[in-house]
Amino acid sequence: LPLSLVFPPQQAIVMVLILELVGPAFLLKRAWGAVTSELGLKRLFISACLACLLLLPLGIAFQDIFSQKVVTISIALTVVVCSIALLLPITRQISISAGGVALAGGLSGAMLGLTGIGGPPMVLYLLASRLDPRLVSSFLMLYVSLMSLLKILASTAYFQISLFVMLV
């Protein structure tokens, strides 16, 4: 039973994000070592995170603007479309670039803010790259964990600001 059918989407998203943080916690140190051992990859990781952080508030604001039904449908459509996209064969042909990572990170942030599902744009981009699969795995583990934490913190801050504005 999907959580968004039992709880309001905003609460369901936070529950899933907490699980995403707890799950890989014991592997994050090793993943950090792998990503930071390559200077270029460390810079790309920082670019991806900054781009995601830049558009994350937009997605969170959309949660407030749209009805719960629209947000729930957005979550369902995101799951279906991203699942299909991840099932399609991907040829590893592209060279990873700062612009590509920033674009995937920004799209990731907006999707994460609205639906709580931000990983697929970055997953698809990195899977299409020539990057070593072990580095892709480490990069994604760190990226998804950090973005989950940022989404929880940003949602909490946004909720508190919205509550303050309503009370004033």
Image: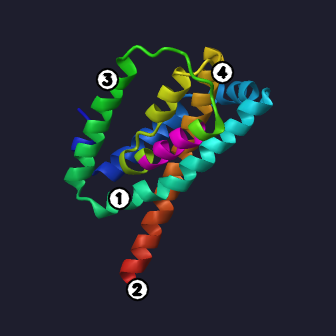
Real-space CA distance between mark 4 and mark 3, rounded to the nearest whole angstrom: 24 Å
Real-space CA distance between mark 3 and mark 1, rounded to the nearest whole angstrom: 24 Å
Question: What SS does tag 1 mark?
Answer: helix
Vertical placement of 114 versus 137: above or below?
below
Asked if residue 143 is among those painted magenta in the image, a careful observer would answer: no
| Badge 2 amino acid | Val
Asked if residue 109 is among those painted magenta in the image, a careful observer would answer: yes
Real-space CA distance between mark 1 and mark 2, rounded to the nearest whole angstrom: 22 Å
Percent position (x, y) of residue 47? 65, 44
Q: Which residue is mark 1?
A: 62
Q: Which residue is mark 4?
A: 135
Q: Which residue is mark 2?
A: 168
Real-space CA distance between mark 2 and mark 4, rounded to the nearest whole angstrom: 49 Å
| Badge 3 amino acid | Ile
* Quadrant in the rendering for residue 12: top left
Give the residues in magenta: 101-110
- Residue at 26 percent across and 37 percent down: it is 77
Mark closest to the chain's N terminus, 3 or 2: 3
- Residue at 58 percent across and 43 percent down: it is 102
In the image, 21 versus 92, the foreground residue is 92
- Residue at 64 percent across and 16 percent down: it is 134
Percent position (x, y) of residue 95? 62, 24
Vertical placement of 64 versus 46: above or below?
below
Q: Which residue is mark 3?
A: 84
Label 3 CA crowd tier, 10 Å (few <14, some 14–19, many 20+) = few
Viewer-nearest of labels 3 and 2? 3
